Image (spheres, grey):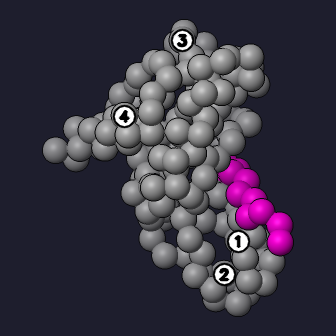
């Protein structure tokens, strides 16, 4: 069986129905709500793995329109601590469906975005909601610390 691939675009997350193979779009503004396959009506679950963001326009749409807080892991392939934290980020993604979304940005692929956001240390975790950066924290962290960071940023926004 093929791995469930999720591709972000400017309007939402495009994913394949695990039952019938139909491609479906989860629009960013409705993330956290129930989605059903357009063809077979199987309920589609929110992403439970990090989403790779390869274009600035997708980053802007995701962080600006998502109804859920978005944890972004800024990383680079040559960065040792980034490689160490990747499985921890994946753990946090697996705990977050319907509560938050996890995205990964390779700083080598989007240097303009990195410069505009003044990312000057990696790995760097940042939480975005409604187009605003709520918090950021540099350095490798265990999943428990990343989870606490996301939850605190979300509470600061809603409290």
* Mark number displayed over residue 121: 3
Q: Residue at x 74, y 23 (%)?
A: 77
How far is disc 4 from disc 3 in space, using C-alphas? 18 Å
Q: Position of residue 130 (x, y in %)?
A: 41, 43
Q: Which residues are magenta?
A: 1-11
- Picture layout, residue 40 above or below residue 1: below
Element type where label 3 sits in the image: loop
Numbered-mark total: 4
Assess disc 3: are there few (<14), some (14-19) or many (≥20) residues with their C-alpha within 10 Å of its C-alpha.
few
How far is disc 2 from disc 1 in space, using C-alphas? 6 Å
Q: Residue at x 70, y 50 (%)?
A: 9
How far is disc 2 from disc 4 in space, using C-alphas? 35 Å
Q: Identify the residue under disc 1.
A: 24
Q: Position of residue 100 (x, y in %)?
A: 43, 52
Q: Is residue 148 left or right of residue 122?
A: left
* Marked residue nearer the N-terminal end (1 or 3): 1
* Marked residue nearer the N-terminal end (2 or 1): 1
Quarter the N terminus occupies: bottom right
* Mark number displayed over residue 145: 4
- Frontmost of labels 1 and 3 is 3
* Mark number displayed over residue 37: 2
* Marked residue nearer the N-terminal end (4 or 1): 1
Do residues under tags 4 and 3 come within 8 Å of each other at their CB atoms?
Answer: no
Q: Residue at x 67, y 66 (%)?
A: 25
- Frontmost of labels 3 and 2 is 3
Do residues under tags 2 and 1 come within 8 Å of each other at their CB atoms?
Answer: yes
Q: Is residue 90 left or right of residue 77?
A: left
* Marked residue nearer the N-terminal end (4 or 3): 3
């Amino acid at each position: 069986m093929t791995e469930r691939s999720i591709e972000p675009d400017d309007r939402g997350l495009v994913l394949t129905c695990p039952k019938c193979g139909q491609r479906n779009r989860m629009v960013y503004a409705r993330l956290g709500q129930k989605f059903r396959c357009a063809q077979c009506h199987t309920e589609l679950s929110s992403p439970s793995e990090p989403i790779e963001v390869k274009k600035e326009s997708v980053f802007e749409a995701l962080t600006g329109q998502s109804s859920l807080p978005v944890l972004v892991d800024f990383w680079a392939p040559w960065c040792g601590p980034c490689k160490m934290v990747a499985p921890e980020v994946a753990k946090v993604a697996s705990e977050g469906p319907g509560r938050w979304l996890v995205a990964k940005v390779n700083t080598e692929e989007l240097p303009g975005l990195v410069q505009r956001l003044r990312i000057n240390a990696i790995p760097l975790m940042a939480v975005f909601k409604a187009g605003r950066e709520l918090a950021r924290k540099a350095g490798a962290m265990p999943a428990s610390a990343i989870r606490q960071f996301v939850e605190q940023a979300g509470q600061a926004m809603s409290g």
